[in-house]
Image (spheres, coloured by chain):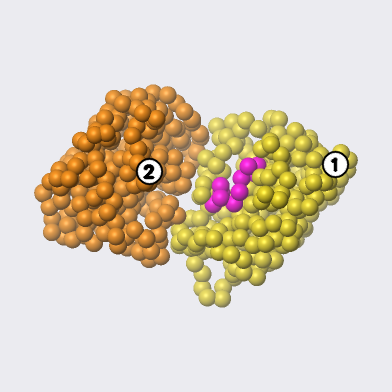
Chain colours: A orange, B yellow
Amino acid sequence: MDHLSANRSHGGTQGVYQHESAATGTAMTFSVFVPDHAPGAKLPVLWYLSGLTCTHANVTEKGEYRAACAEHGIIFVAPDTSPRGDEVPDDEAYDFGKGAGFYVNATRAPWSTHFRMRDYIERELPDLIASEFPADMARQAITGHSMGGHGALTVALRNPGRFRSVSAFSPIASPLNCPWGEKALGGYLGPDKADWREYDACALLDGGARLPDLLIDQGEADGFLTEQLKTNLLSEACARAGQPATIRMQPGYDHSYYFISSFMAEHVAWHAERLAA
Amino acid sequence: MDHLSANRSHGGTQGVYQHESAATGTAMTFSVFVPDHAPGAKLPVLWYLSGLTCTHANVTEKGEYRAACAEHGIIFVAPDTSPRGDEVPDDEAYDFGKGAGFYVNATRAPWSTHFRMRDYIERELPDLIASEFPADMARQAITGHSMGGHGALTVALRNPGRFRSVSAFSPIASPLNCPWGEKALGGYLGPDKADWREYDACALLDGGARLPDLLIDQGEADGFLTEQLKTNLLSEACARAGQPATIRMQPGYDHSYYFISSFMAEHVAWHAERLAA
């Protein structure tokens, strides 16, 4: 693992790292914020999965999570959203290919070689975090934004018991039922929608999967709400499943980091309560 | 004045605006955060002057000031650092020309036509803020970073009574005594260093100017500290002048927005105490 940068910030260290990923077959970059802590101490981990077009850098620069993570003693991990590099196939559009991995293991050529973000996020990167950082992997939580909100929900639904708490900012509620999802899952997984269901939060809930506790913030002025995000589908799936959830519609807020940063400290505090030893 | 963007954030509105500046003869862009407030209410104003290479966008995206400004009910204004546009002369280096206006009125060709950032910051933009925003101009404070710290100090020292409080993050303490200052002031003002003194915080203090109250944060791991910033010169000038000042050296912190954002909330709270009605 290479250390690309380290900056002292908010009473901790904001680092950016790169490693050769076996899952994606590429170099992968991610950021980790580690609050100051006693020697030998292990801290709980909050994962943040980013949205379309993003790298680790967007939330690292604009997410405003460090003050809250330092206050609560939480490690914050921000992975990239896809494999990168000249050898990685891409698409001209912003919503497919690089920057748009959708946290799936692609099964269709040419994507299946490198686009293995599910394995990367669920297995490889957690192992690396556990070995290289003072992380208490028995105390993990996960959140994310938009495509990364979809990622957070589906990773947690497929891995019961791994996370004590799950939240999301303006998640894609159901890739089976929106243009972003149809394009991406169709491209990565092929046309059989039965294969998409393990990557759809609503379908996973309908199939019996459950989350420990769920907090959602969604901006009412978000231009993607009606066509792509469809928070109502998640509300309805939670209701059908008896899944406890706090789903908050935030008047006036849009899809940007101006929205995310406004509620980040509340999400960190909410996770902190559930991550307390 | 054109509204380029408006995003709801932290219980307020983060806007970006552009107007035709008479001072610089160019279009100038700036950002303003306005917390929610009662109809007709006027809020105090905190100015933030940015450093070399920056536009309004750096602090707007990375400064982490909105939560504190919303809590304390303070308008936050972030101007650009120089005139912009194809007609504006530039220099290949990052520390002269565009992005490096040093908050002076240039007197040397070809800079004197557009590089009139002193007039812009001291006169034109305050008038625009007063007319277009719910600003209580009797309650102003100013801060800034690096070149913008120099700007905040010198604007305040030349305008006694305008600001209730002044702070800075890693300011250039004395352009008369560092390579950045020698290059920029020499280029904009010519070789007679007597002409530079009104743009040098230490020289202004030595000449009898005073500040209402002063807070400085400086990272000890800042790579520019020894050669360019020279906080010690400001400490010594304050001591000679009997100028009250809190100058804090912050172990481990560098020159980046990871440093600035770490102490931004404290600066906003410190100004808020002094801006209280």
Q: Which residue is mark 1?
A: B190
> Crowdedness of circle 1 by 10 Å Cα count: few (<14), some, many (20+)?
some
- Residue A153 got which mark? none
Chain letter for mark 2, please.
A
Name the residue located 61 percent from the left edge and 33 percent from the top edge.
Answer: B222
Q: Position of residue B14 (x, y in %)?
A: 51, 59
Q: Residues within 10 Å of mark 2 (few under 14, many from 20)?
A: few
Find residue B182 and report its horizontal and vertical position in percent.
79, 36
Badge 1 sits on which subunit? B
Q: Residue furthest left?
A: A208
Q: Is residue A197 left or right of residue B140?
A: left
Identity of the residue drawn at 56% across and 35% down: B253
Q: Amino acid at mark 1?
A: Gly
Q: Is residue A39 left or right of residue B129?
A: left
Q: Quadrant of the C terminus of chain A?
A: top left
Check disc 1 and report its element: helix, strand or loop. loop
Q: Position of residue A202 (x, y in %)?
A: 18, 53
In this view, the residue in front, A149 or B222, is A149
Residue B186 is left or right of residue B269, and the answer is right
Residue B214 in sight here: no
Residue type of the residue flagged with mark 2: Glu
Q: Which residues are magenta?
A: B51-60
Horizontal side of residue B194 vs A151, given as left or right: right
A26 or B199: nearer the viewer? A26
- Residue A229 is a magenta residue: no
State the mark number for residue A92: 2
